[in-house]
Amino acid sequence: MKALPLLAAALAFSLSTAALAHDPSEKITVLQEQLLKNAPGKKAMMIEVDYQPGQSSIAHKHEGTAMAYVLEGEVISQVKGEQAITYKKGQFWYEPAGSEHLVSKNASQSKPAKLLVFMVLAPEEQVLIPLEH
């Protein structure tokens, strides 16, 4: 019986990782995924996003709340209704649940960039939903 929760967790982890794969060369690593005991019906995820020089993500939205912190390099981010902002190492931003993330890209054509993303969402919610153009 104890194997069932482990199997479910492994499946959720693999599905979450697959859902994050925007671009085959973009490296997405789920560092941690945990159900929250103090917030029933919610889980937290910690994700690392590695951008190669000049690389960008597709336009997307998150069903959950997201907070991003630049670990390395510079990242340009734009949420619908707001101006694009270039965030440097040590800077961060917040995206409310359901925000449409129109731009997320490495600001440099010669250096890599890395983000740490923390999300809170319901277990059945999708981490990333591509936007239709």
Image (tube, rainbow, N blue to C red):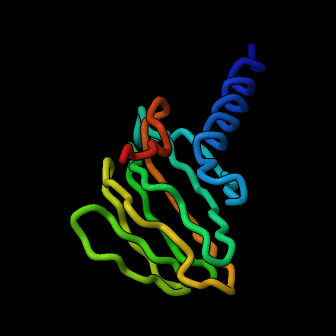
Percent coordinates x, y for residue 88 in the rendering: 51, 87
Residue reaching furthest left? 81
**Residue 39: percent from left, percent from top:** 40, 41
In terms of image quadrants, where is residue 73? bottom right
Please say if 86 is above or below 55. Answer: below
**In-image side of 25 versus 37 (left or right):** right
Rendered image quadrant of residue 101: bottom left
Q: Give percent across and percent down for residue 20.
A: 59, 47
Between 50 and 31, the one nearer to me in the picture: 50
In the picture shown, does residue 83 fall above or below 80?
Answer: below
Number of residue marks: 0
* Viewer-closest of 54 and 51: 54
As drawn, 74 above or below 15: below
Look at the picture and state if 40 lies above or below 22: above
Q: Residue at x 43, y 42 (%)?
A: 121
- Point out the residue furthest to the top here: 1
Question: Could you tell whether 12 is left or right of 61 in the image?
Answer: right
Q: For the point 47% across and 67% down, which residue is it?
A: 104
Who is closer to the viewer here, 31 or 73?
73
Image location (x, y in percent) of residue 86: 43, 83
**Is 61 placed left or right of 20 in the picture?**
left
Q: Residue at x 41, y 48 (%)?
A: 62
The image quadrant that residue 12 belongs to is top right
Q: Residue at x 70, y 36 (%)?
A: 14
Identify the residue at the far right of this view: 3
Quarter of the figure with the N terminus = top right
